[in-house]
Amino acid sequence: MLLTNRLFTRQPPSREAKSLYIFCEGAKREVQYFRYFREMDSRINIEVYQLKPGENNSPIGLLNIAKSCVIPTKENPAPKYRFQENDEVWIILDIDPDKAGSRKPQIRKVKAFCKENKDWQVLQSNPCFEVWLYYHLYKDRPEFEGDDKCANWKQFVGTAIKGGFHSSRHPIFIQDAINNAKENFDSENNEPKKGCTEIFILGKSIITILKNKIEKVLKEIEE
């Protein structure tokens, strides 16, 4: 059986309803992954920003996009998203270094902004988003040649998971990913170590509302 979100029935809104506004460096994989959860339950609204071709997806570029989409200003009184109490903004970044060495200073600025603004968080994966995908199906932190490079991680995950990671069904194992990523998490100088990811923190925010529904579907599939 395909583990799609079509197995879920939506519930009416409640006081615990919230919106998550997610901004990622990737224009495809990350967007597909988080959109899996959008139609599961009306109590959680997940908006994943779709980067436009040529749009600046550097850490500072992504922060500026998020600010323009969420924060009303005199010049932009009606931003794309209507941020309300209980809502959250999440910025997802890779650690994969650039040749100019400009990422770390930018990431520090993004972190400083999020620290000063309630309900804004920045999360990192070392070296990229595929680390988070890997933990949906595996418990142990892997080590392989070139595991500090994003391109190698993409290839590794595509091989380690039979048929590759499918955003139409594998996100159902988000609770496993949370547990595995948290168990293997380690940091140095305020950054995740190689093969580690902070995205389990966002996962916990998503699962707060969806946990019972996901567990019910997994049980039905096992039976």
Image (cartoon, rainbow, N blue to C red):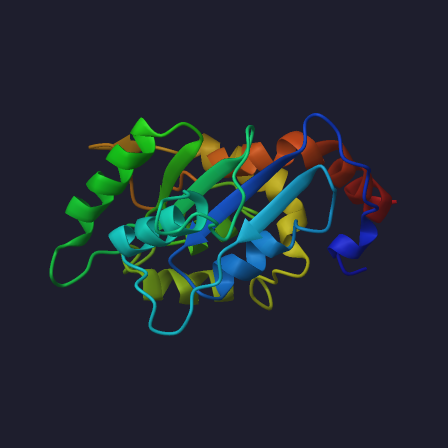
Residue 51, x across and y down, in percent: 43, 64
> Residue shown at 19%/60% (left/top)?
98
**In-front residue for pair 64/212:** 64
Residue 180, x across and y down, in percent: 51, 37
Figure check: 176 above or below 126: above
Residue 93, x across and y down, in percent: 35, 49
Q: State which quarter of the image contains the C terminus.
A: top right
> Residue shown at 20%/47% (left/top)?
106
- Seen in the image, is 150 located left or right of residue 69? left
Residue 79, x across and y down, in percent: 46, 50
- Seen in the image, is 193 located left or right of residue 212? left
- Seen in the image, is 155 located left or right of residue 167? left
- Seen in the image, is 16 located left or right of residue 24? right
Query: Which of the 4 quarters of the picture holds residue 214?
Result: top right
Query: Which of the 4 quarters of the picture holds residue 19?
Result: top right
Query: Which of the 4 quarters of the picture holds residue 213?
Result: top right
> Residue shown at 74%/42% (left/top)?
42
**In-front residue for pair 175/108:** 108
Figure check: 92 above or below 16: below
Q: State which quarter of the image contains the N terminus.
A: bottom right
